[in-house]
Amino acid sequence: MNITLLSLFFQLQLLGTLENKPVVLCADPAVFHTSVLLSICQIETSNDFSFGLCWSEKSNPSIFDDFTIFNNEQSSFEFRVSDLNPNTIYHFRFFSLDKNGNTIYYSSFQIQTIRELQVGDYYQGGIICYIFAPSDSLFFVPWEQHGLIISKEDLGFAQWGMHGRPISDSTHTGLGFGKLNTEKILKQLGVASVTYYSPNASGLKIVYPCAALLCHEFVSDGYDDWFLPSKGEWEKLYLKLDFLSILALNPNLDYWSSSEVYFTWKFNKDRPRYTKYHHKRAWQVRLRSKELVVYTMASKKNSVLVRAMRYF
């Protein structure tokens, strides 16, 4: 910006006055992979000046870089800087702009955006197996990353539970229902009914814990909000077959989902439609090969492998 020495002297004088009451941050910035959320305190409004923020990947950003001008009627507010690059250092500076277009810049500060998370990353106690997409409307936030984390090891074998009976409020197969399904299963089973016994050939009883309980009691790196994944959540995991080797899933055994099996069909074309609920079965999944995933209906009495998931 071309300015005269007199104008520069005028700006420096103003800077000495305004530096005592600059636009300041009220709290530490919230940093994401493509955005930064700033809590701003505008100490004093002015009819003579507009206040703003400029930012750039290079030092000493100016209004010739990216910038915004704040609403002077707000004394404190939040402002999100979006469309940033992940894992990048950005330089920020507050500025004031007078009615003649003269600009005064305040001290600069730096913020580094976080690295973009990827499927296969170890994160928050497990391995990221799916990152929510824009089509996942219940979970998607444009400037944040959220998704599914799976435990890095099997939790052991377990029966599903609720033999011959459905969950009263019904379970679901879709994405986002694993945690709710798990809560419903445990609520209906009750604390006294979460362990099952099965006699073997010698008449001894083998203890099989409930699959949902294994997930509910699982803790990893301090995270204790794990659940038995729904059928739809297993399906999301298998969208990325190239990373499955790091999970060490057993290719010869099945894994439980938290989704019961519900079927509706006609016994006879001349008769009314009858609804059949397979209360004795629940969905399970197996990776038969790197290209083949099989979903089968298994008896709830079966002893099947368990993996836990959690949302992040």
Image (cartoon, rainbow, N blue to C red):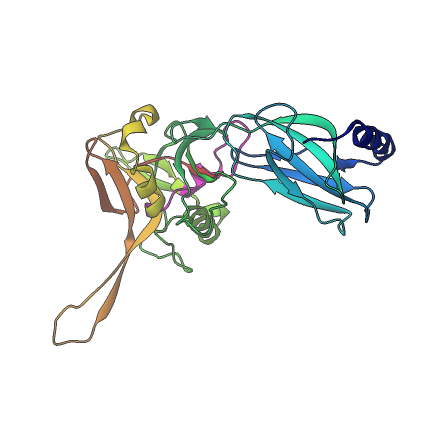
Residue 249 painted magenta: no
- Magenta stretch: helix, strand or loop mostly: loop
Labels in figure, total = 0
Q: Which span is picked out in magenta?
A: 212-231
Q: Is residue 274 left or right of residue 220?
A: left
* Camera sees residue 163: no
> Of 182 and 234, which appears nearest the observer?
234
- Asked if residue 167 is positioned above or below residue 221 in the image, the reply reads below
Q: Is residue 274 left or right of residue 311?
A: left
Q: Quadrant of residue 292?
A: top left
- What percent of the width, then of the height, locates residue 294? 21, 41
- Asked if residue 304 is positioned above or below residue 120 in the image, the reply reads below
User: Quick one: quadrant of the N terminus?
Assistant: top right
Residue 224 painted magenta: yes
- What percent of the width, then of the height, locates residue 67? 62, 38
> Of 259 and 28, which appears nearest the observer?
28
